Image (cartoon, rainbow, N blue to C red):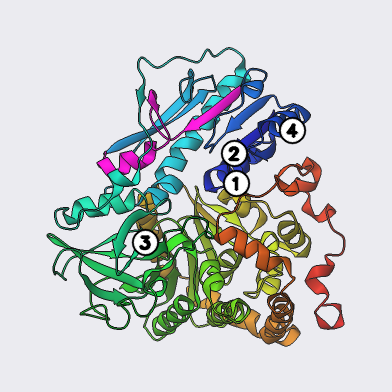
Amino acid sequence: MRILLLASAFNSLTQRVFAELRDLRHTVSVELALGDDQRLTSTVRRHAPELVLAPMLTTAVPEEIWSAYPCLIVHPGPPGDRGPSSLDRAVQQGVERWGVTVLQAVAEMDAGPVWASADFAVPPDIGKSDLYRGELADAALRAVLLAVDRFASGSYAPVMPSAHTWQPYLRQEERRIDWAHDTTATVLRKLRAADSRPGVLDSFLGGEWYLHGGHPEPHLTGTPGEFLATRHGAICRATVDGAVWIPELRPRRRPGGPATIKLPAAQALPEGRGRPSTTGSRHPTGGSYADITYEEQGTVGFLRFRFPGGAMNTDQCRRLLAAYRHARTRPVDLVVLGGRRDFFSNGIHLNVIEAAPDPAAESLANIEAIDDLVEEILTTTDRLVVAALPGNAAAGGAMLALAADEVWCRGGAVLNPHYRLMGLYGSEYWTYTLPRRVGPAVAARLTEEALPLTATAARALGLVDRVVECAPGEFEGEVARMAAQLARSAGLPARLGVKKAARERDETVHPLSAHRAAELRRMRAVFDDPAAPYHALRSAFVRKRRPHATPDHLRAETPDHLRTEPGHLRTEPDHLRMDCPNGE
């Protein structure tokens, strides 16, 4: 069918629905609902879709659209649930099960007949955004695909729920933390219900801040609300019965002022206000918070990392490199890289770069730091390295995964192996690793089209070696089982020999240093040019500015014969070879 996705943003769920429907051979386009109903209605008419599907919509569908076209809405709540803060309230209230409903758009928001629904268990210790990209997204895809099939059959009649419950917008008054009375469990529920957006508004150190994310601290205690420690950019505050870690802060926007930026908590607090990293905490490096951990199971080393939003700043990249170098000294045959769930990596930390005194210099420092990590992985020839992707990966984070010998990916993950939408050429040795896996023609297509891929599509292209079909909470165990099996395999020594020979051969043909120098030459030219689109795109991204129009690449569907035979798309991928000597 011709399906048009109507969305407020091309967010993770919209990307997954887009990519999954394309895999099923539907013709899929996207239009962003940007506040101009008349323009949107006109655009939908030009698309002439057989079905309009809204995976993530924060405004009502204009009547001119839902009355003229079948329009299905994905609502993050069970049948009968209505309102704009459905998932927020579910997490804050600590529900054990929740659901997703695909319903038909009508005059009243979320009140239409139901085409499909799916429910899921809510893990007790994760945030709303992790849940949204994990269990909820899995359920949403089941419901969306069922609804599309039912619509295509032409024989299914959607059913009205027996009752409706309106859940009003969850305002800051209900989210606010009462440090003098709220227990750690209550504080964590409030923080996790607002972890990505909108955050929990709080007042301290002479300012107002939105708190983002929350992790328990089992050992440190103090006066409720007191700063106790900082670690790896996070700050620790006491509760009535324990303490919590808060990874990120965002200053409250002043009336008429510019949008503020979410940053690592210790960095966001200015000097002179008792900044925790200097004089504002009793334990500057204490506590149990860790965004990077290493453990061994038999002859397998697991280097796990979890960075908010998947972004990796310069310090995080350097600490991850140090941890990886430590893993290389250990008596293990296999090193597995990746977190337990949610994001793998989205590459450099654009928020930290935007807030830096010299964004160009910080951009280069961040790129150099992640390049150092990728180089260390690529030059590891005495053991195998596996990148285990429990969730999405994009840009430099996707290329980081390609440095490993094998890439294992949870079936629900979405990959965006490109940089173009941020106005960047890219680094992380992608001009070596991407063509090595998929060939130069497909590499050119992926970087130029700049469209998301499902894990299954990525495996078909050669980007991914194994797709693990499991629930988000099961991925860690499945990876451990697969890694133990691989480490015990009889062919491991021979495979390491082949790996070492291949690295030596590749180095003589075109050294890694040449790839890095060519990539960084292009990147420096962008960083150092104040007029380069990267700077405006970065600022718009971190400040959540809405685009003026739907990007063209989301409107055009790649013809089937070019998608299935990617070698026909480009005969000479010049952008992959222009910096290489002798036409390599």
Closer to the observer: label 4 or label 1?
A: 4
Q: Is residue 81 magenta?
A: yes
* Amino acid at pointer 4: Thr
| Residue type pointed to by label 2 | Ala
Q: Nearer the viewer, mark 1 or mark 3?
A: 3
Q: Secondary structure at mark 3?
A: strand
Residue located beneath label 1 in the image: 10
Disc 1 secondary structure class: loop
The residue that mark 4 highlights is: 43
CA separation in Å, label 4 and label 1: 17 Å
Looking at the figure, which quarter contains the C terminus? bottom right
C-alpha distance separating marks 3 and 2: 29 Å
Q: Residues within 10 Å of mark 2 (few under 14, many from 20)?
A: many
Q: Residue at x 21, y 50 (%)?
A: 186
User: Whole-Å distance between the Cαs marked 1 and 3?
Assistant: 27 Å
Q: Position of residue 435 (x, y in %)?
A: 71, 67
Q: Which mark is residue 209?
A: 3
Question: Residue flagged by tag 1: what amino acid is it?
Answer: Phe
- Say if 324 sits above or below 95 in the image: below
Marks 4 and 3 in Cβ contact (< 8 Å): no
Between the C-alphas of marks 2 and 4, the distance is: 13 Å
Q: Based on the picture, tell me whether residue 60 belongs to the magenta stretch.
A: no
Magenta highlight range: 70-95
x and y, in percent, of residue 83 in the image: 41, 31
> Reading the chain from its start, which is encountered first: label 1 or label 3?
1
At a point 55% along the width and 82% down the height, the residue shown is 372
Mark 2 — residue?
7
Q: Mark 4 or mark 3: which comes first in sequence?
A: 4
Which quadrant would residue 43 be assigned to in this image? top right
Work out whether 299 lies above or below 198.
below
Could you say whether the residue bearing mark 2 is in a helix, strand or loop? strand
Q: Earlier in the sequence, mark 4 or mark 1?
A: 1
